[in-house]
């Protein structure tokens, strides 16, 4: 095999956490896509070494191991320094470690189609317990009497009950729809309060959303606790922007859906996506912001999953689509090149 191609395959396939443990690193800890441990190069004792999983770069904070070499501080240099190997030897070593046959010849097409999903999907959720949970009794502070704004959107309140939606009549969240946010295991990790109005002046004056303190929306996928059985059944995860997209989608019979709570996706959410599926449908709003956001999300997921787009019409979103239109879009998703061709000007727009 061409050494360059083998290097790229190894680089994408190697699990840095398992590698560090394999070459003798101690005190290994993982948080926010960064591995901390004792330096395996100079055999340190404290957590003076880090490996950034997203960037694929290591750093030694005490002796600055590898910085003077003049090569990228990646997994190859790490093995070269720990095992006293040259570059080709390190590539062969990591290929064997990752289960890649270095004698197999690959075509350019094989190389282009190569995926790195497998090792990522098998990784455990990183530091899930670091997300603090809330006392369930906090939900009793809010009313189950829904305001007209919500009832006009959801005549069938069984969906609102499923997602435990409440309404705040007073206090910090006064006049807001309360959406409990749970992690994939069902732990209550946050509350979001949405003003019960579409009045633009009120939304600007009081802010459309308020969240409980210390809650990070980028640490969870909204609705995953309900959707994961449907994702497993269908082999597809639909990603949308907001809470009400998820609720409306359930009401329309498409239940393998989660929300990123914004038109972006963060590393913790990517971990959750690739843990549960290898196929993603992006269903973001049919406006410039939604399409630009969907394209950016596609670029962050495309190396890990097969990603398609629902062609949401201009000015619409999942919540506003009628059942028939939504199902038509779901059953005929767009490929990335089709989406880019159709919405190229919007994707590159600076507005």
Image: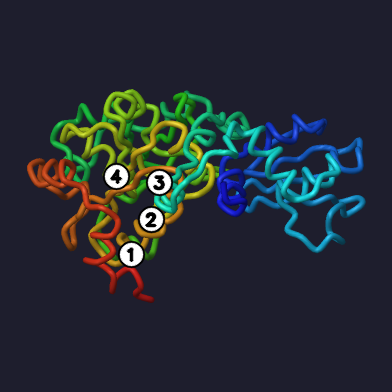
- Tag on residue 281? 4
Q: Position of residue 268 (x, y in %)?
A: 53, 42
Judge left or right: residue 140 versus residue 347.
right
Residue 201 visible within the image:
yes
Q: Which residue is drawn at 47% across and 46% down?
A: 106
Pick the front one: 265 or 165:
265
Q: Where is residue 104 in the image (x, y as percent from the top left)?
A: 53, 39
Mark found first going from the N terminus, 3 or 4: 3
Q: Select label 2 or label 4 by which is in front.
A: 4
Asked if disc 2 and disc 1 are in contact, CB closer than 8 Å, the reply is yes
Mark found first going from the N terminus, 2 or 4: 2
Mark found first going from the N terminus, 2 or 1: 2
Q: How crowded is the residue under tag 1: few (<14 C-alpha within 10 Å), some, or many (20+)? A: some
Determine the CA span between mark 3 and mark 1: 14 Å
Q: Where is residue 142 in the image (x, y as percent from the top left)?
A: 38, 33
Residue hosting label 2: 263
Query: Toward which corner of the image does residue 238 lie, by quadrant?
Result: top left
Q: Compared to 296, does 265 lie above or below?
A: above
Residue hosting label 1: 289
Asked if disc 3 and disc 4 are in contact, CB closer than 8 Å, the reply is no
Give the secondary structure at mark 4: strand
Determine the CA span between mark 4 and mark 1: 17 Å
Residue hosting label 3: 260
């Amino acid at each position: 095999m061409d050494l360059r191609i083998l290097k790229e395959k190894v680089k994408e396939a190697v699990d840095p956490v398992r590698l560090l443990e394999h070459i003798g690193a101690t005190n290994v800890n993982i948080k926010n896509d960064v591995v901390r441990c004792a330096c395996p190069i100079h055999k340190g004792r404290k957590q003076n070494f880090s490996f950034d999983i997203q960037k694929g770069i290591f750093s030694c904070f005490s002796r600055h191991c590898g910085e003077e070499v003049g090569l990228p501080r990646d997994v190859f240099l790490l093995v070269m320094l720990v095992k006293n190997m040259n570059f080709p030897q390190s590539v062969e070593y990591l290929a064997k470690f990752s289960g890649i046959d270095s004698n197999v010849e690959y075509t350019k097409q094989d190389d282009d189609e190569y995926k790195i999903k497998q090792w990522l999907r098998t990784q455990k959720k990183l530091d899930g317990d670091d997300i603090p949970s809330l006392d369930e009794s906090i939900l009793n502070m809010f009313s189950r009497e829904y305001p007209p704004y919500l009832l006009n959107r959801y005549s069938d309140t069984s969906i609102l009950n499923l997602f435990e939606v409440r309404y705040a009549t007073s206090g910090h969240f006064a006049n807001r729809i309360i959406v409990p946010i749970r992690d994939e295991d069902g732990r209550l990790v946050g509350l979001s309060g949405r003003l019960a109005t579409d009045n633009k002046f009120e939304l600007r004056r009081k802010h459309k959303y308020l969240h409980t303190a210390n809650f990070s929306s980028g640490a969870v996928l909204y609705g995953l606790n309900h959707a994961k059985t449907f994702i497993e059944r269908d082999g597809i995860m639909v990603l949308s922007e907001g809470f009400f997209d998820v609720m409306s989608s359930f009401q329309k019979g498409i239940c393998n859906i989660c929300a990123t709570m914004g038109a972006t996706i963060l590393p913790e959410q990517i971990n959750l996506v690739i843990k549960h599926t290898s196929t993603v449908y992006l269903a973001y709003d049919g406006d410039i912001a939604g399409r630009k956001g969907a394209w950016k999300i596609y670029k962050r997921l495309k190396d890990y999953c097969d990603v398609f787009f629902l062609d949401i019409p201009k000015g619409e979103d999942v919540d506003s689509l009628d059942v028939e239109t939504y199902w038509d879009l779901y059953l005929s998703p767009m490929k990335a090149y089709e989406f880019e061709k159709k919405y190229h000007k919007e994707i590159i727009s600076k507005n």
